[in-house]
């Protein structure tokens, strides 16, 4: 990258990519927490509600994959949302043993607010990046995920990993 005479490099351009990815994740989570505090939601609840808003009723497993959660974590998040009356679970008419999670009327109303927050955060996250730069970043991050998936497959797996060490299955790519 060539710098114009008056331009100075951003102070974070010398930091390793792993640290930048981690710092970006932390900063997004901090911003999401701050925006959700008045609504009494956690970031995990936010992501689940957005999936339901955008994709309609979902099985627990499919929803968990969309937001990079393992099934037990997603189950706890959904339980908390059910207790607040924001989602409900109903039998899946197409599958005898599966349930579908869907927003309640109150959850659907809240989803309209959540969508505004999501759009604002997404726009601010990519502000100053051209479409081409966003594509390059997206491709680079996708390759890093693929690389870490391959590394995770090489790691020995204990018979029962502690919760923090479990590696959820890679979800389908979502544009949350």
Image (cartoon, grey):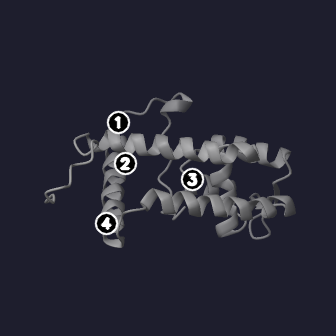
Which residue is under mark 2?
Answer: 149
Q: Describe residue 30's horizontal placement relative to residue 108 as left or right.
A: left
Which residue is under mark 1?
Answer: 155
CA gap between label 2 and label 1 equals: 10 Å
Residue 110 appears in which quarter of the rendering? Answer: bottom right
Label 1 sits on a secondary structure element that is: loop
Which residue is under mark 4?
Answer: 133
Q: In which quarter of the image is the C terminus?
A: bottom right
Q: Where is residue 116 in the image (x, y as percent from the top left)?
A: 65, 63
Q: Which of marks 2 and 1 is in front?
A: 2
Is 118 placed above or below 144 here?
below
| Residue 160 appears in the picture as rendered | no
Q: Quadrant of the N terminus?
A: bottom left
CA gap between label 1 and label 4 equals: 33 Å
Q: Describe residue 115's horizontal placement relative to residue 87 as left or right.
A: left
Which residue is under mark 3?
Answer: 67
């Amino acid at each position: 990258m060539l710098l114009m005479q008056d331009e100075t490099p951003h102070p974070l351009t010398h930091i390793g990519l792993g640290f930048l990815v981690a710092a970006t994740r932390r900063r997004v989570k901090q911003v999401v927490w701050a925006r959700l505090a008045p609504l009494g939601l956690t970031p995990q609840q936010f992501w689940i509600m957005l999936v339901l808003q955008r994709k309609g009723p979902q099985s627990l497993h499919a929803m968990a994959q969309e937001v990079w959660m393992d099934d037990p974590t997603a189950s706890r998040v959904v339980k908390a949302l059910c207790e607040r009356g924001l989602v409900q679970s109903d039998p899946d008419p197409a599958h005898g043993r599966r349930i579908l999670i869907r927003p309640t009327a109150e959850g659907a109303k809240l989803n309209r607010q959540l969508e505004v927050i999501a759009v604002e955060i997404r726009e601010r996250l990519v502000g100053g990046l051209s479409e081409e730069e966003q594509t390059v970043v997206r491709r680079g991050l996708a390759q890093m995920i693929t690389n870490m998936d391959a590394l995770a497959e090489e790691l020995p797996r204990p018979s029962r990993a502690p919760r923090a060490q479990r590696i959820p299955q890679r979800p389908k790519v979502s544009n949350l």
